[in-house]
Amino acid sequence: MSDFSSPEFPHARKAAEHPEGGASGSAAAGREKLIDGKAFATALTRETAEQVRAFHAEHGVTPGLAVVLVGNDPASEVYVRNKALQTHRAGMRSFMHMLPETTSEAALLTLVDRLNRDPEIHGILVQLPLPAGVDARRVTNAIAPEKDVDGLGEVNAGRLALGLPGLVPCTPLGCMMLLKSAVGKLRGLNAVVVGASNLVGKPMALLLLNEGCTVSVAHIDTVDPQALARTADILVVATGHRALVTKDWVKPGATVIDVGITRIPTDSGKTKLVGDVAFDEVAPVAGRITPVPGGVGPMTIACLLRNTLTAAKMSVASPDVF
């Protein structure tokens, strides 16, 4: 199951600790401050592929991932196709289901039920958001918990809240891997998560709590989130508001994980990606920091592949966990 002691990925951890390029950000920050998520994700995917080969050799089973996209949003289509490409590169089978915008909730639930019963599929991901009129919660919970590689169903969310092994949401899982590579022992540290979404903020807070951190969550009703953030040894920001966190939010020497990603226009007429953290002013204050791009982003797909392998192993070794 998805925990942080087994399996270990030593090469991925080494890649993040000793980046050889690929992470962006201000040179003034110093490369030693950057947590290189791109390098970590590349090494993690390579090690996952090695484990896929070993798993297939032992059990004759190739992990299979089904991805369902409803609608024709161009950005989502690119993202989903990239997932399929990475799945193949990791030696897994990819099953793509591209459905029209007019797909009914009933038809989508019927597809999910069929995928649940397909023994060749070990992981199911329904790309969010879903069209108006389709209940995302109902669809997510229709996915069999042992195939819920996005970790968003209520069974896996409950297991995470109770500190039990389960399939953990990919982005928080990636953040935790990067934190453990950068900080090492987390027990006893003060952690603040800015943002309380079901996708990132809440599961991130639970993961940190399960690692022995003292955890606070800043959300829309928090009276003084800036003051709260300044108490953090570990600051995770996931709000969707670009450059929200400035240097005045950050305790000197804190480790900062920026989950946000927003595309903005530049003076040249092109666009660029920025995070929720004002990188150029925060980086000199922080002890370690993830850049955008090249930080958390690449970890999401890498952890999706890891969760798919975990689900496949569970289908062979522990089919009755849920």
Image (tube, helix red, strand yellow):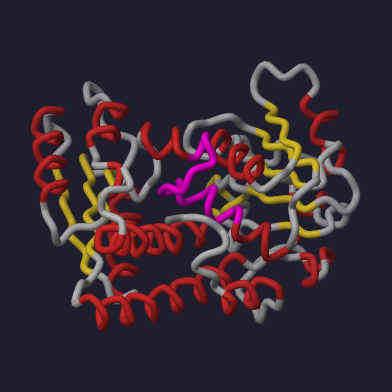
Residue 31 visible somewhere in the drawing: yes
Residue 111 percent coordinates (x, y): 11, 42
Is residue 172 highlighted in magenta? yes
**146 sits left or right of 234 in the view:** left
Residue at image coords 35%, 55%: 79
Q: Is residue 29 left or right of residue 139?
A: right
Quarter placement of the N terminus: bottom left
Provide residue 295's location: percent of width, then percent of height.
61, 60
Viewer-side residue, 173 vs 196: 173
Q: Farthest residue to the right: give it.
A: 252
Task: Answer above or below: position of 180 versus 232.
Answer: below
Q: Which residue is drawn at 31% across and 27% down?
A: 137
Answer with the quarter of the image where residue 302 lies: bottom left
Query: Residue 189, percent across and down?
Result: 80, 46
Which residue corresponds to the image point at 41% horizontal and 63% vertical from the top-left?
306
- Which one is in front, 111 or 120? 120
Q: Where is residue 234 in the image (x, y as percent from the top left)?
A: 76, 47
Residue 270 visible in the shown view: no
Residue found at x 71% / y 45%: 212
Q: Give the range drawn in magenta.
A: 160-176
